[in-house]
Image (spheres, coloured by chain):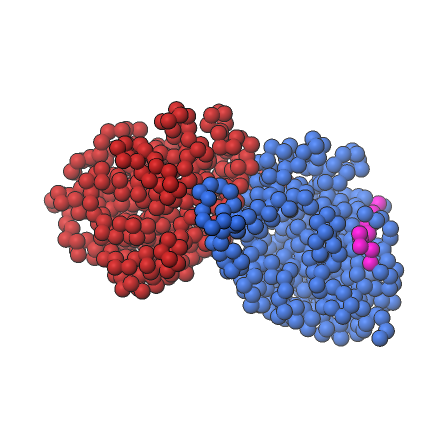
Chain colours: A red, B blue
Amino acid sequence: MTTQEPPGACTSPNPLGYKVELGLDRPIKLDCGVELGPVTVAYQTYGTLNADRSNAILMCHALTGDHYVADPHPITGKPGWWNELVGPGLLFDTDRYFLICSNVLGGCMGTTGPKEINPATGKPWGLSFPVITIGDMVLVQARLLDHLGIETLFCVVGGSMGGMQVLEWAQSFPDRVFAALPIATAARHSAQNIAFHEVGRQAIVADPDWCNGDYLLEGKRPHRGLAVARMAAHITYLSETALHKKFGRKLQDRQSFAYGFDADFQVESYLRHQGSTFVDRFDANSYLYITRAMDYFDLAAENGGVLANAFAGTKTRFCVASFTSDWLFPTAESRAIVQALNAVAANVSFVEIKSDKGHDAFLLDEPEFHATLTGFLDGAAAHRGLRPCKAG
Amino acid sequence: MTTQEPPGACTSPNPLGYKVELGLDRPIKLDCGVELGPVTVAYQTYGTLNADRSNAILMCHALTGDHYVADPHPITGKPGWWNELVGPGLLFDTDRYFLICSNVLGGCMGTTGPKEINPATGKPWGLSFPVITIGDMVLVQARLLDHLGIETLFCVVGGSMGGMQVLEWAQSFPDRVFAALPIATAARHSAQNIAFHEVGRQAIVADPDWCNGDYLLEGKRPHRGLAVARMAAHITYLSETALHKKFGRKLQDRQSFAYGFDADFQVESYLRHQGSTFVDRFDANSYLYITRAMDYFDLAAENGGVLANAFAGTKTRFCVASFTSDWLFPTAESRAIVQALNAVAANVSFVEIKSDKGHDAFLLDEPEFHATLTGFLDGAAAHRGLRPCKAG
């Protein structure tokens, strides 16, 4: 992975992304009290930063996402998670915006996390890595923007855990966020969602190859546990309707039951595939740390129990979006955000998109959702006075 | 566990239950084609069989239940799963009805299953046990009734997988079922439910102590995998509202985050407890077999794709009950059953109980639900001409 510095104005993106070391002189003070530095941040950019540095959009990835928004994933070769939305003339118009996405703190695609080497010991951090929060992730992103010389973001956008980061940005750096797009997210992780995360974590730590977190030192990988964690989580990303439409009770490569424990049903085969491919690209300890950060997220609790306090006096323009069939981050969670924003007279629009695709809808082809994003970005860009960077 | 024969008329129950060997002369032909026999069946009875043997109620237990309906569980010491409903003058009035509940085929509380010894080899069956179906479970129950000299059941009742057995009874032995009470169940297991089961099974087989199913021979127990399976399943038994009300984001024995992977949240601690206590009373291979039986259940598919065909000409009186917050077996599944019954002009009533307790509501204190059961049983008993067995 390239460690060269970021692009100047109007350069092309580097498909492998960039890396930068931050906090060399000023460590990053985490919520847990630990001072971390240096912190390596892996990131990607698309488009061109304009002369007055006013067209930057920070894209925040979800739990198992990374900064390869619109590039082939370097491990799986699959298209980026918003590949169809990024490019010249597309929703995230690279002729107009400068897009930045960084792998989150605690991640496993280049940014400092439990899989990386602790410079103090020369060994992988493992469980000696400090427990992090969504606030810590955002703090590191803010340092990255400092490094890139971007004072104010035109927009911060993200779905699911990415949406949590959007909300955290709006709370912690209100003056640096012109517009905010939290999608399919919540201002606090629910008991049910904590429960699902805990199942995933217990699946990982139950795998003897996890080696109390030291599997990299031991030359092992807790693939079985991580695959089970992924399978359980994956169900929560889809809707019952989507699973029914996609698979129903259809059998896999057979006409009748095999009366055994192979994958008789297509849905079993699909889930097993989701589990087994995930382990090639994701680190088990990262999964522990990032799910933990989500569990800890509770913007109201950080603001005296009143969510509206998180946004008092905000000048940011918000667009909150949810999906009807999302039962992981149901619309009620988005409504709570909107009500808090309304309580402080914030500029907020809210759209509940009708979709049967469940939580994953924010990553899928949902024309009404995309039209909503486009409309909001266009309106905000007009207010911001943004025009295409390239002539013609 | 006692192997003495069942009680005659008006005897007291035996708190340890009974065991009987069936299929000694005539093996039980399973859906997979295997002929199984002898089959040991562990069962329990409450109340007294009347002179004309017309007051028997078969209670069908759920996935992880057993025949200790109203006795302390012999391993955990906890009260039976419908302990509050069974007794003189109670909902299941032991002065009026003769209640029977048997541990299902494939179970692990005394009935023949993968944990028991295969008489042909002298070793635990393990994965050499044939894969079973809900139909097989019901066939064994029918043999038990033959043995007890009960031709016709006054009622078959059960929730969840118990409800599947109720439906199977009504289809396979319509002349032996006067009344049927399928609760919180479905006529076919959904893709999402198969998916959750598959996660549980993969958690079990991922545990090296599962030993390819031979853990009993190896002196091991896949406790970690089975606990993860239970944790994942347990979330599906509750509603999001129930989890929120019961735990919310409350911390466990601490005032603030520990910034670690211990159980910070009460919901984590609760789930871990559910997992760790489950493994003391349940067998991992039984979990594989019984979940598989549920996955295979599809009454419509067995009847040319038309669910109504399963009930054509039925004279059984049905009461179908569901719970508003049950997302594992949502009301839509019960409606499908009711619609099929209506299509064949069956005698059916349907009640959707308002409850925030999720799927587990059928095991909990739900007065409206209990009033429904009482009303239906009273009406059916009047039609059947049943009076209390004991005078005064």
User: Residue at 69% of width from left, 31% of height from top?
Assistant: B218
Q: Which quarter of the picture shows residue B211? A: top right
User: Vertical placement of B275 versus A219: above or below?
Assistant: below
Residue B300, given in percent of the width and then of the height, sits at 61, 57
Q: Is residue B192 visible?
A: no
Residue B344, given in percent of the width and then of the height, sits at 64, 68
Queried whether the magenta region covers residue B87, the answer comes back as: no
User: Which is nearer the eye, B142 or B379?
Assistant: B379
Residue found at the far left of this picture: A391
User: Vertical placement of B133 versus B317: above or below?
Assistant: above
User: Which is nearer the eye, B319 or B108?
Assistant: B108
Judge from the rendering whether residue A233 lies leftward or rightward of residue B94; answer left or right. left
User: What span is in magenta?
Assistant: B13-24
User: Vertical placement of A138 versus B370: above or below?
Assistant: above
User: Residue at 37% of width from left, 53% of height from top?
Assistant: A302
Residue A269, given in percent of the width and then of the height, sits at 52, 41
User: Which is nearer the eye, B194 or B378?
Assistant: B378
User: Residue at 45% of width from left, 47% of height from top?
Assistant: B257
Counting every numbered tag in the picture gives: 0
User: Residue at 36% of width from left, 59% of height from top?
Assistant: A307
Residue A154, given in percent of the width and then of the height, sits at 21, 49
User: Which is nearer the eye, A226 or B122?
Assistant: A226
Queried whether the magenta region covers residue B20, the answer comes back as: yes
Q: Which quarter of the picture shows residue A115? A: top left
State which quarter of the image contains the C terminus of chain B.
Answer: bottom right
Q: Is residue B324 visible?
A: yes
Judge from the rendering whether residue A103 lies leftward or rightward of residue B380; answer left or right. left
